[in-house]
Image (spheres, grey):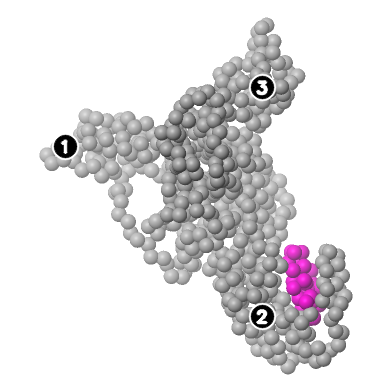
Amino acid sequence: MRAIALGIALAVGVSLPGLAAEPDGPAELIGKTEAIRIAIQDQVGANSMPDVAEQIALAEYYSVSGRKPLWVDENGLTKRGKAVMAEIAKADDYGLRTSDYKLPKLSGFNPAAPNAIETLADAELKISAAAIEYASDARGGRITPQSLSKNLDPSLFLPKPAEVLAFIAIRSDPAAYLRSFQPTHPQFEALRKELIAERGGNAPQQQEVSGPEDVVIPAGPALKLGVEHGQVALLRKRLEVPVKDGANEYVFDAELREAVKAFQRTQGGKADGIVGRGTRRLLNGNEAAAPQVSGQQKIDLLLVNMERYRWLPQDLGSFYVKVNIPAFKVSVKGDEGTVWESRVVVGKTHTQTPIFNDEMEEIVFRPNWYVPNSIKTNEIAPYLRRGGGFFSGGWDTSVLKRQGLRIRGVSGRDIDPDTIDWGRSDIRRYEVYQPPGPRNVLGLVKFRFPNSHDVYLHDTTQKHLFANAVRAESHGCMRVQNPDQFATVLLKHDQDWTAARVSSAMQSGANANKILLKQNIPVYLTYFTAVVDENGKLQQHRDLYGHDRRMVAALNGRPIPAGLPDNATVSSSANYGRRTVRRRSSGNPFGGIFDF
């Protein structure tokens, strides 16, 4: 059997020096501890494991002659072994699945039984394998995100099996060491408590918070200064503006107008003080609300959101940027919590904003917009038609002029688009760009964190979109509602800039002005559809891109449901993680990822 173990090790290029020195005698001559170790080696070699790295780590660890088992002795499970098994048995409470780990059953173990050595070796190996798998799963190893969608592209920080064994062997509290692989973020712990409560444990105490009365303002005439209407009284309740003594509560007065303006400003809309159809929709405030789920649906919701915290590093940094796509929000976080927050417009369901982590390197004021090939071919080339007239070479290039776009050749010089035969020329050979100016789709500033998806945060000329409750309107980039404030917060932290200096950079100069950050700022593009707010209440967001449903299917070994945003219809066999399941492969999500 040891020859089998050696053969497997050599096949994967592993040196097992301890094997050559192992005695070949019966267990009673070499000691029970060494006999257990040798039996473990035999079992490692005889059984094929799905994870080659795990099998190599186990083979290497137990190849050292004289090394004592980690979890058993000749009498059965040790205190350390019992502690680790008890910790793994609590996996369900952390959003994992206890049944995924093949733990031994040693109740009634008899040290004098003929097969005692083999039983102990089996138990030792199972616990070590379970510890390795638990550590990997706790850090996000259960599924491979990009097997579900190319838009799920987080950087996973999976522990190496050999390192897990090496460190757990020297820890005085191996159970605590395993637990340390679970996310330490406060939101993860809050969701974990919600999960335990939903499964029938002790429910977390939620504080009742009083707020504006739930008032729905129905369709009706425009409400503005001087108007007398029954809905004005509803508006007062909604905005908490009581009528003055002796005044008519149905009359729209100046105080109410200021309250309406203040509300409109918070929603990013035009602060005109008039309640029309758009402001009514915002006041009623449920356009983007997700269906509030319970039971197994709520459990699934909590599990997939807990899983996404495993995609993040344990230490997010002392100062970082976080975008939560389903909430349409960007925030800057510091040691004391949220430093700044604003609304964003994110990608459409067919041009999604990807989920990944990176670092912001520069802020560009008055940027050029360089049109990506996807938009060149899909949204510009079809409009370059014949029929522009004799002097234009027969091609209509008005689409370029309307958008203020310029053409640059390989020489780096601008070219008159009317001189190009677009019937014979591939538009992808040319650099198509939009110079700084009031029509530039990136606005006055962009925030760059170079990445393979070519997405970034930036200003926009379409300010009206921030008034929408659902703000999925871009080609993948994120448009920031208050980019001047965003730039001020970041540059004050990095280079002690003032708001006045930021304003000057945004408003002056004809060319792009790049400001390199002295210290890169971590950026996390996330997708959390369940968030516990500061009052301990679970807030649920709509599954905009279908990622919740993809992950629920993957975690349960089911095919990805058909009809999700950006889903292809080709079914294939894929390995989501350690468990092979069937899935529906996702299509290419990267067509046209810039705003246009």
Amino acid beneath label 3:
Arg
Q: Is residue 45 found inside the magenta-colored segment of the image?
A: yes
Amino acid beneath label 2:
Trp
Toward the top, the furthest residue is: 390
Looking at the rendering, the stretch of residues picked out in magenta corresponds to 38-64
**Which residue is identified by label 3?**
408
Amino acid beneath label 1:
Asn
Q: Of 205 and 561, which appears nearest the observer?
A: 205
**Which residue is identified by label 2?**
71
What secondary structure is marked by label 2? loop
Between the C-alphas of marks 3 and 2, the distance is 68 Å
**Which residue is identified by label 1?**
248
Q: Is residue 536 visible?
A: yes
Q: Residue visible at 35% across and 40% down?
A: 283
Q: Is residue 237 visible?
A: no
Q: Label 2 neighbourhood size at 10 Å, few (<14), some (14-19), many (20+)?
A: many
Q: Residue visible at 83% across and 73% down?
A: 17
